[in-house]
Image (cartoon, rainbow, N blue to C red):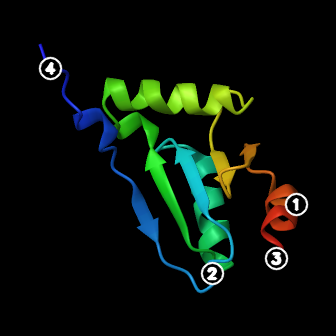
Amino acid sequence: MRRSVRWERMKIAKVPGKNNKHKVLMYAISTCAWCKLTKKFLKDNNIEYEYVDVDLSNIEGREKIRREILKRGGSLSYPAIIIDDKILINGFRKDEIKETLEI
């Protein structure tokens, strides 16, 4: 039986911004206050970023995200922000985000 590749098509939303110096991907929970604050912070600073609302993804998508975060040494807390495919920041750590994004 061939396995479906639907899970690889997680709903990734792109938020445009003038500051696209860094690749920013955020894993969030749609109802999480800290995730909403992080999205607002990025938008207010005109940062281009992509995000996935983990709770709105299917089971396979959530598992893929979980493995990705753990592989990078992060914890399963949200938001989880991956910058330039290298740096993982768990939580709304404003100073760390500002420093990493050079804003």
Callout in the foreground (4, 2): 4
Q: Position of residue 29 (x, y in %)?
A: 50, 41
Question: Do the numbered discs 2 and 3 sit on residues whose CB atoms are within 8 Å?
Answer: no
Residue at point 66%, 49% (across, down): 81
Question: How many neighbours does mark 1 have within 10 angstroms: few (below 14), some (14-19), or many (20 or more)?
Answer: few
Which image quadrant for residue 68?
top right
Marks 2 and 1 sit apart, C-alpha to C-alpha, by 16 Å
Q: Which residue lies furthest to the top in this view?
A: 1
Residue at point 37%, 32% (across, down): 61
Q: Which mark is residue 103?
A: 3
Viewer-side residue, 83 vs 1: 1
Q: Position of residue 82 (x, y in %)?
A: 66, 50
Q: Which mark is residue 61?
A: none
Can residue 76 be spotted in the picture?
no
Inspect the image, locate mark 4, and give the three-letter code of the amino acid beneath it.
Answer: Arg
Q: Residue 2 carries which label?
A: 4
Mark closest to the chain's N terminus, 4 or 3: 4
Q: Position of residue 4 (x, y in %)?
A: 18, 28
Marks 4 and 3 sit apart, C-alpha to C-alpha, by 46 Å
